[in-house]
Image (cartoon, helix red, strand yellow):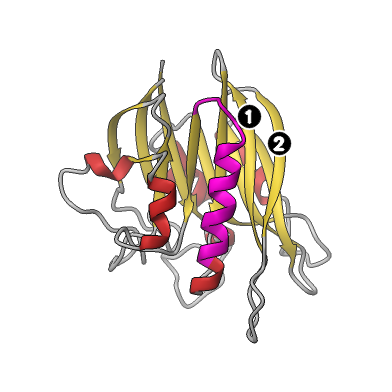
């Protein structure tokens, strides 16, 4: 069965075509998703409903606009704001949802709490999808990589891992993940970059898959919606 997957850091739906403004624009995010008609979308930097009126149920709003099912996993609550974390959109039934916290390293500087959204989808057989967002500092990335590897080892189903890893492809922190998962970017005809979306200088967004999948194609299209370009992959299960 052929499916299309997208990973997309939406930066709380902030329209990056207006970089001087914090303009929340669900239309531009939904249009970027609809343009490629993916079956599964992993979203990062997503707000949930909170005390601040700008903290709405963003996953639900984008899911409604794209006519998809959704799940949301808050990594933490922003003070005077609301929940903030990762989300999943799916055209397939969602059988199970779990939030896996990433341990916060013991440092003398602040580290934003992070998490992994784990969802089991019914794609004529169970498929486990992981959506995550790594921290910026090396101890955060190392903790995130270890948490991902542990989570991947906990299931025997076909697996998809995607997200904003804040790491370039040459980072050794990704090596433990590459042992069991294939990087869909390996099929790029030439290196493609994902951040920042208007003039990208680095690739920090990824879609990894287990050996149950054949990677048909992958791309990072030239779209300015969020500050990240979306990462796409077409897979055969």
Based on the displayed image, in which of its 4 quarters is residue 200 positioned? bottom left
Q: Is disc 2 surrounded by few (<14), some (14 to 19) or many (20+) residues within 10 Å?
A: some
Q: Any magenta on residue 25?
A: no
Q: Any magenta on residue 146?
A: yes
Q: Which mark is residue 120?
A: 1
For the point 43% across and 51% down, which residue is it?
Answer: 176
Q: Which mark is residue 97?
A: 2
Based on the displayed image, in which of its 4 quarters is residue 198 positioned? bottom left
Towards the viewer: 190 or 35: 190
For the point 39% across and 38% down, which residue is it?
Answer: 35
Q: Which residues are magenta?
A: 141-158
Place of residue 236 in the rendered image (x, y in percent of width and height, measured from the top left): 36, 21
For the point 38% across and 36% down, which residue is it?
Answer: 36
* In the image: residue 40, left or right of residue 217: right
Q: Which mark is residue 70?
A: none
Place of residue 51 in the rendered image (x, y in percent of width and height, measured from the top left): 84, 65
Q: Is disc 1 surrounded by few (<14), some (14 to 19) or many (20+) residues within 10 Å?
A: many
Q: Where 201 falls versus 97 (above or below)?
A: below
Q: Quadrant of the N terminus?
A: top left
Residue farthest to the left, as pictured:
189
């Amino acid at each position: 069965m052929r499916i299309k997957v997208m990973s997309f850091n939406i930066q709380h739906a902030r329209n990056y075509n207006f970089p001087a403004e914090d303009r929340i624009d669900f239309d531009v995010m939904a249009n970027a998703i609809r343009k490629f008609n993916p079956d599964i979308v992993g979203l990062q930097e997503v707000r949930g409903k909170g005390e601040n009126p700008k903290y709405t149920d963003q996953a639900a709003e984008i899911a409604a606009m794209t006519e998809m099912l959704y799940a949301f996993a808050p990594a933490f609550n922003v003070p005077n704001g609301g929940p903030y974390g990762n989300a999943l959109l799916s055209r397939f039934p969602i059988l199970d949802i779990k939030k896996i916290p990433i341990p916060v390293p013991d440092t003398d500087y602040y580290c934003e709490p992070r998490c992994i959204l784990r969802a089991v989808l019914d794609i004529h057989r169970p498929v486990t999808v992981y959506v995550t967002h790594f921290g910026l500092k090396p101890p955060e990335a190392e903790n995130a990589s270890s948490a991902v590897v542990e989570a991947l080892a906990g299931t025997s189903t076909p697996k998809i891992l995607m997200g904003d890893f804040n790491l370039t492809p040459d980072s050794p922190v990704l090596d433990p993940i590459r042992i069991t998962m294939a990087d869909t970017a390996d099929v790029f005809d030439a290196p493609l970059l994902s951040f920042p979306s208007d003039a990208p200088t680095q690739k920090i967004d990824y879609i990894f898959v287990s050996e149950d999948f054949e990677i048909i194609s992958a791309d990072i299209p030239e779209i300015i919606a969020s500050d990240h370009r979306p990462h796409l992959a077409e897979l055969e299960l």
